[in-house]
Image: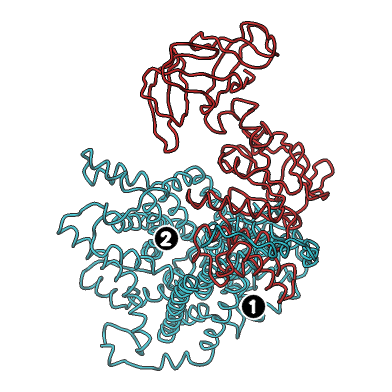
């Protein structure tokens, strides 16, 4: 039921267009991530939903309540939106104890003392901080502060949870644990959650759906698999994980579901699926490094198979990263196997090629 | 920590259900709409700042005092003012006084700042603390101390004139400017020191590494970078100089050397018909000059202030990266700084202290022959005792009220979506530009015009309290706005997001976090209101004297001993306030850390 709908949101700061017709919705109990580089408008979007930024145009509603509607001149104050918000800096009040921090939202709602105490302790238990109720924020580690912020945002049963890069101040190890833990909590409580991050790993591992943003606009929305395997634009392809972008030109019109192209860099033929290209079309192919098959030097060549030379190899623990030279075309490939090189053979499976609009 | 442990299913169901209506509860709490409250605070500040100005201007274009009948609109007061040769002399004197004061204090203040923060002069760090003491000490006490020591018949006066044959006469305009300089040096010193600490010493060191001599570095690197600070503090000192009242009243005026402020005061208090419009006209002229200077300052500093703040990011400066003076130069400069501080600050206060326990302070008779506690007994009762109680009362209540009002106003200016919030900083900076006597005369007319409660305020100490509080609004805003920038806006946004109204998040989150800053501003306001006196000169009514007014009155009648004792009381209360403030402030911080 508590579904966030954002429609046609626009916002300009001076000359700069911070949001450009942003529309998406978060379904009930869904974990949706706004992903994008810094300055892409994701935090402005989140803060518009929370009520700390007033957009110039558009509409925001949540579970049937209109938060903001420029056309109807509706603007609900931040404190009336009943959302749970976790700030990037956590914003734990330094003059209050952990208990005081979590109790504050309930005190505003004039909850009776006993009920308040019970509820605060429940919320602290939920984030495994019950033992720290009497501590002050400066006596807590970053991870603990973050969980207090979460308890404070959950204690009054807000309709949805908004998280603004909550893990960016944690170190890498802690971040991974916090991620698992948050996902667990979210699933258990069935919380409708809107999460903002610039970290693709976070986005991929946590989200039910991802909305990729850049320069104030939504580029693509979909499940993590969808976005990763079928990026709609070159920006999305490159922003999520590594990606080889190969320029190519169609030589024959599509037949039987596949198209023949020629790689611009080395003139080699390449076959890709799809049949909506005409001869002479210039396109870009997105190829994930892990999708390329790498073998030792083999004389026989098949479809999309090319001889290549190893330029550099990096050992990354569970795999190797190869920078290859495919007859003048630079190609990044990962493989679990080690190859002595320098001569190797690569095969780019047609299914691994994603055609991007040029 | 056990991040991996999973929440049990029962806790899950307990947090989830919403058994009450949270948002509705939050709204029920808001009795007054947020904008109404913010508008009320905004309006209060605006009224306080404009209250002394508008009635003053109005009074200056009337043929008779505002309370008299049969008034007509006229510019006669201005014609009379400009026709008066005494006014022209006072205006020229004021210009001379302000020019000498500004020039000398710039040279000395900037020089001391460079010595203390850029060289290895001995005791530089201690000196840099001591240099700013005259700002905290009661200005009138310092003036009276100078008069005791360097004035006609003072110890140092005779020593300098007769023994060293250096002609020193504090009662002339250049003489008054010497004292003016001594009181203005701390202002220049503070501004320059702040600027210097914002400039990375590596900028100077790199010049030296390419072969520039220390003097060359000073002339080509350090001083050019100080230019905005010099401009800023120079204009500030000039503004303060043209409104000087205490210095001419104590020193020059009795010898016929008036500045504008003392001319206006004397005209006011000795006029045949009371409260003449000509004084309002003169005050309006002075106000116009002050506003012009303020405008000039913001215009000139508009671009340069930005340049100063960029430097704020630079590395730390200090003795470590400073220039090394030669050994003999080092010692000589160190001794010179010590002598300067002694002569300008400590000796006058000591002379004041000595003067308070003798029947007469004179170089002709050894003071122990004239020892008496009579002066202290005199101030133990009557007008003097009353004035102490009144001053402390005014300062306490005024500081609390002003701190509260400015804290709220700063919250509106920096933490709200109120439409006119951006105008508040300008409004709050304005009282700094209004000369003290204008606040005095202005409120006098305001209380006449707005009655009730005008005469009730005028016939009690609260009218003076309001005037002195308005004058200290700017000081409070400086402290508050700096404090607000240290508290992240996300802290009160977090409160808003959990359902708190503007008022709740300000009073329950922001102010408690700012407790130390609120306390510091309370102490500073207490000191400032306690030691201020020029607005009160025009508002005082019998039985409602404050210390400064009582001292000036008595000093003008030639009473020295009790005045010195009263000044010492003022100094003592000030030092006690600083000490209590420092201690409590320290423990507050410690308490917050350990709690």
Helix, strand, or loop for circle 2? helix
Q: Is residue B279 visible?
A: no
- For residue B392, what is the image quadrant? bottom right
Chain B visual colour: cyan
Image: B547 above or below B213: below
* Tag 2 and tag 1 share a subunit: yes
The disc at residue A98 is none
Q: Quadrant of residue B363?
A: bottom left
Q: Chain of mark 2?
A: B
- Looking at the rendered structure, the secondary structure element under dot 1 is helix
Check whether the beta carbons of the residues at disc 2 and disc 1 lie within 8 A of each other: no
Q: Residue at x 33, y 79 (%)?
A: B350
Residue B540 drawn at (x, y percent): 60, 78
What x and y, as percent, mark residue B559? 43, 84
Given residues B324 and A109, the one toward you in this image is A109
Quadrant of the rendered structure where residue B269 is? bottom right
- Disc 1 designates what residue? B462
Cα distance in 3D space between marks 2 and 1: 30 Å
Q: Quadrant of the C terminus of chain A?
A: top right
Q: Which percent across, then down, holds residue B557?
A: 47, 82
Relative to residue B263, is residue A21 drawn left or right?
right
Q: Residue at x 25, y 43 (%)?
A: B216
Point out the tag, 2 or 1, that comes first from the N-terminus: 2
Number of marks in the image?
2
Which residue lies at the image location 62% right of the left edge and 56% below the top edge?
Answer: B414
Colour representing chain A: red
Q: Is residue B296 above or below residue B332?
A: above
Disc on res. B187: 2
């Amino acid at each position: 039921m508590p579904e966030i709908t954002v429609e046609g949101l626009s916002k300009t700061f001076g000359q700069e267009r911070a949001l450009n017709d942003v529309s998406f919705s978060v379904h009930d109990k869904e974990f949706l991530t706004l992903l994008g580089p810094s300055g892409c408008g994701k935090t402005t979007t989140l803060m518009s939903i929370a009520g700390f930024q007033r957009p110039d145009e558009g509409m925001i509603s949540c579970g049937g309540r209109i938060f903001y509607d420029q056309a109807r001149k509706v603007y609900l104050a931040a404190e009336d939106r009943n959302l749970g918000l976790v700030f990037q800096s956590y914003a734990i009040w330094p003059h209050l104890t952990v208990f005081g921090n979590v109790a504050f939202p309930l005190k505003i709602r004039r909850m009776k003392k006993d009920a308040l105490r019970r509820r605060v302790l429940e919320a602290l238990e939920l984030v495994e901080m019950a033992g720290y109720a009497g501590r002050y924020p400066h006596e807590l580690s970053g991870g603990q502060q973050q969980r207090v912020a979460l308890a404070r945002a959950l204690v009054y049963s807000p309709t949805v949870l908004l998280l603004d890069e909550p893990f960016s101040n944690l170190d890498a190890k802690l971040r991974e644990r916090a991620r698992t833990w948050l996902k667990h909590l979210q699933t258990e409580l069935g919380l409708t959650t809107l999460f903002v991050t610039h970290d693709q790993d976070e986005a991929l591992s946590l989200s039910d759906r991802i909305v990729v943003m850049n320069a104030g606009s939504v580029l693509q929305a979909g499940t993590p698999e969808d976005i990763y395997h079928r990026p709609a634009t070159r920006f999305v392809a490159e922003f999520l994980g590594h990606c080889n972008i190969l320029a190519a030109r169609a030589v024959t019109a599509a037949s039987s579901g596949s198209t023949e192209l020629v790689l611009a860099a080395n003139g080699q033929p390449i076959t890709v699926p799809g049949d909506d290209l005409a001869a002479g079309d210039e396109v870009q192919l997105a190829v994930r490094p892990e999708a390329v098959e790498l073998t030792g030097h083999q004389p026989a060549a098949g479809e999309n198979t090319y001889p290549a030379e190893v330029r550099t190899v990096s050992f990354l623990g569970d795999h190797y990263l190869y920078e290859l030279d495919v007859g003048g075309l630079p190609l990044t490939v990962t493989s679990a196997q080690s190859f002595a090189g320098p001569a190797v053979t690569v095969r780019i499976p047609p299914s691994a090629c994603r055609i991007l609009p040029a | 920590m056990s991040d991996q442990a999973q929440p049990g299913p029962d806790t899950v169901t307990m947090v989830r259900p919403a058994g009450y209506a949270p948002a509705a509860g939050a709204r029920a709490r808001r009795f007054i709409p947020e904008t109404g409250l913010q508008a009320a605070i905004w309006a209060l500040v605006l009224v306080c700042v404009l209250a002394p100005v508008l009635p003053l201007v109005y009074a200056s274009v009337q043929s008779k005092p505002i309370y008299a009948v049969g008034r007509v609109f006229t510019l006669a007061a201005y014609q009379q003012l400009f026709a008066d040769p005494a006014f022209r002399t006072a205006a020229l004197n004021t210009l001379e006084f302000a020019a000498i004061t500004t020039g000398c204090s710039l040279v000395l203040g900037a020089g001391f700042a460079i010595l203390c923060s850029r060289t290895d002069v001995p005791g530089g760090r201690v000196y840099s603390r001591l240099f700013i003491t005259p700002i905290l000490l009661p200005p009138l006490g310092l003036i009276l101390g100078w008069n005791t020591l360097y004035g006609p018949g003072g110890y140092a006066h005779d020593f300098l004139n007769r023994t060293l044959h250096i002609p020193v006469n504090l009662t002339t305009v250049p003489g008054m400017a010497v004292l003016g300089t001594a009181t203005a040096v701390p202002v220049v010193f503070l501004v320059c020191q702040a600027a210097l600490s914002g400039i990375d010493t590596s900028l100077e060191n790199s010049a030296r590494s390419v072969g520039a001599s220390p003097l060359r570095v000073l002339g080509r690197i350090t001083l050019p970078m100080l230019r905005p600070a010099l401009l800023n503090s120079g204009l500030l000192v000039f503004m303060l100089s043209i409104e000087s009242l205490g210095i001419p009243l104590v020193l020059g005026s009795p010898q016929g050397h008036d500045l504008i402020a003392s001319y206006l005061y004397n005209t006011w208090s000795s006029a045949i018909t009371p409260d003449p419009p000509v004084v309002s006209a003169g005050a309006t002229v002075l106000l116009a000059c002050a506003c012009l200077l303020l405008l000039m300052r913001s215009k000139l500093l508009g671009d340069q202030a930005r340049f100063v703040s960029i430097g704020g990011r630079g590395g730390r400066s200090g003795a470590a990266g400073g220039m090394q003076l030669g050994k003999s130069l080092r010692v000589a400069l160190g001794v010179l700084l010590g002598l300067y501080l002694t002569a300008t600050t400590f000796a006058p206060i000591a002379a004041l202290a000595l003067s308070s326990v003798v029947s007469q302070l004179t170089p002709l008779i050894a003071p122990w022959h004239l020892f008496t506690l009579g002066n202290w007994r005199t101030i133990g009762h009557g007008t003097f005792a009353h004035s102490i109680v009144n001053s402390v009362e005014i300062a306490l209540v005024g500081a609390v009220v002003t701190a509260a009002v400015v804290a709220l106003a700063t919250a509106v200016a920096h933490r709200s979506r109120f439409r006119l919030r951006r105008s508040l900083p300008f409004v709050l900076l304005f009282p700094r530009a209004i000369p003290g006597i204008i606040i005095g005369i202005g409120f006098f007319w305001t209380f006449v015009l707005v009655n009730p409660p005008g005469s009730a305020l005028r016939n009690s100490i609260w009218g003076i309290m309001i005037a002195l509080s308005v004058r200290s609004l700017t000081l409070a805003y400086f402290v508050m706005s700096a404090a607000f920038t240290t508290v992240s806006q996300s802290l009160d946004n977090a409160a808003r997001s959990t359902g708190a109204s503007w008022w709740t998040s300000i009073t329950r989150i922001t102010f408690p976090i700012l407790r130390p800053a609120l306390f510091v501003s309370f102490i500073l306001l207490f000191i400032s209101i306690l030691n201020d006196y020029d607005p009160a000169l025009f508002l005082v009514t019998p039985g409602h004297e404050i210390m400064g007014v009582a001292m000036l009155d008595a000093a003008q009648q030639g009473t020295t001993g009790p005045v010195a004792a009263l000044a010492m009381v003022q100094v003592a209360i000030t030092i006690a306030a600083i000490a209590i403030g420092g201690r409590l402030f320290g423990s507050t911080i410690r308490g917050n850390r350990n709690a």
